[in-house]
Amino acid sequence: MREPAFWYRPPSSISRLLTPLGAIYGAITAQRMARGGVRAETPVFCIGNYHVGGAGKTPTTLAFVKLLRELGEQPFVVSRGYGGALSGPVRVDPVGHTAADVGDEPLMMAAQVPVIVSRDRVEGAALAHAQGATIVLLDDGFQNPALIKDTSLIVIDASRGLGNGCVFPAGPLRAPLPPQIARTDALVVIGSGDAADGVITDVTKQGASVLRARLVPDQASLDQLREQRVLAFAGIGDPARFFATLRASGVEVIEEKIFADHHPFTPDEIERLVSEAAAKSLMLVTTEKDMARIRSDVRLRKHADRIAAFAVALAFDDETKLRDFVTARLARARPR
């Protein structure tokens, strides 16, 4: 879905009209979050967010994969596989599966880390353990109580925060904020800005950690786009952040095209983008997640060599603080 613009404006007549529905939705979700779950055979670190839409969970997950490997762990990612047809549990094959099978984010991550797609997160964690995982990184699922989390890390964008602070559909929140904050062990704040300051204050008051980070462009991606004028397109939760990251990296973005999150591109759409870029002497550039969908679709992959994928990684401001936090949480999770 494409996020309604009113979600990220001060509460409006539309959000007020939808507030009763948000109260019902929020009450149901909060009640569901309070249920007991099943403990996995391995520690479970959940990487989620308080709201629907993009916040940077995928680069955060991959950053934790890198750190955990440095600590001698064998991390597996367990994902619901949003947008994919397979219910699992199944290990993602980055060559044999498509985004239509397992979802674009799991397919993209599977090139770097073992990924299990499973609608049932308990079964997904069990398969990860059976295949050698020493720790499970739960991709999203913060509001899902089925699997007990040893650590819950919440990702938030410093410039967008939580929008109007209302619960879906009146706003972007998945549940009322207090029960979500109460279950937060660390807040990962990405980028600069003050939109997340209120949440940072609340999380700090309860003794949780705040880990600040920023998105860093891949050097090879920058080299490919150097001195190019580009047409940028994205079908992600926060396309504006993608365009802003390109510009902040010195890329000259001439035109922007926005699609809904996880948008299933059609051949006509990609062909129009390719033709428009060629006619205007622009280079086409998109996100790694969008490119995962394009490359895995037999109808679209012939155009992939005419589209640049702009890769980014998450860099933490205080690596020592991050390492100490993860080490302490692992030690706490293991003596059972």
Image: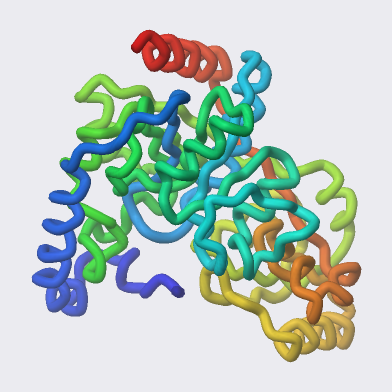
Give the percent coordinates (x, y) of residue 125: 48, 38
Residue 77, visible in the rendered structure = yes
State the residue in front, 210 or 75: 75
Indicate left or right for 222 with 181 as reference. right
Residue at (73%, 64%) from the top-left corner?
291
Viewer-nearest residue: 296 or 243: 296
Quadrant position of residue 24: bottom left
Q: How many marks?
A: 0
Residue at the farthest front position: 130
How far across and how far down the image is residue 32, in percent? 19, 50
Of residues 211 and 326, the one nearer the viewer is 326
Q: Residue at x 36, y 50 (%)?
A: 161
Using the rendered image of the protein, determine whether residue 158 is visible from the camera's viewpoint.
no
Say left or right for 222 vs 65.
right
Q: Residue at x 65, y 14 (%)?
A: 72
List x then y, in percent, for residue 319: 58, 18
The part of the image, by quadrant, that contains residue 242 is bottom right
**For the point 76% across and 67% down, which residue is it?**
296
Q: Is residue 191 left or right of residue 304?
A: left
In this figure, which colouring scheme has been used for the structure?
A: rainbow
Which quadrant, please, contains the C terminus? top left
Q: Is residue 50 left or right of residue 300?
A: left
Q: Nearer the viewer, residue 225 or 31?
A: 31
Location of residue 137 in the rendering, given as x and y in whole percent from the top left corner: 51, 35
Indicate the quadrant containing the N terminus: top left, top right, bottom left or bottom right. Answer: bottom left
